[in-house]
Image: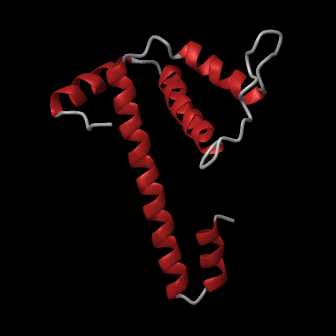
Amino acid sequence: MTQLTKEEKAKALNIWSRMSDMMQSHVLMDIEYRERRRNCCEPYDCMCHELCGMEGMGYCNGCEYGAELSRITSSVSPLVWRLADEMHLENQRQLVAHELQTIKDLESVGDYAAAQRIWEGA
């Protein structure tokens, strides 16, 4: 994915600012859902969702949630999706930076157990 140019970003931010808070939230939830779904099957295809939606079969809760988000956000332009992806990636970077700083702070005061728990994601 390429980064947005300044003009594209300005246009996307203009569209984003005119969207309702609910629609913005749905777009961000859809991005997070897709990331979780992608991570579910990596590095190997776990086959969790292969039967979802086949004739006579319903969707699992996760796929049903994703289908509903896709339906709700179907009118969002590709430019806004790219902006939302960039926003999501920036939020992820900030979260990781915060966690690393917290680990450093805990280690500096000698709380290695808490630092280890954060490092392990517990």
Q: Quadrant of the C terminus?
A: bottom right
Front-lying residue, 16 or 50? 50
Front-lying residue, 49 or 82? 49
- Is residue 17 visible to us here? no
How many numbered callouts?
Answer: 0
Front-lying residue, 82 or 60? 60
Q: As drawn, is 15 to the left or to the right of 60?
A: left
Q: Quadrant of the N terminus?
A: top left
Q: Which image quadrant is residue 4 in?
A: top left
Which residue is outermost to the bottom? 110
Q: Which image quadrant is residue 87 in?
A: top left
- Is residue 95 visible to us here? yes
Q: As drawn, is 37 to the left or to the right of 101?
A: right
Residue at left 42%, top 55%?
A: 94
Q: How is the image coloured?
A: secondary structure
Residue at left 54%, top 88%?
A: 109
Front-lying residue, 109 or 92? 92
Q: Position of residue 15 (x, y in %)?
A: 32, 19
Residue at left 47%, top 70%?
A: 100
Q: Position of residue 70 (x, y in %)?
A: 56, 18
As drawn, 81 above or below 76: below
Q: Position of residue 88 (x, y in %)?
A: 44, 41
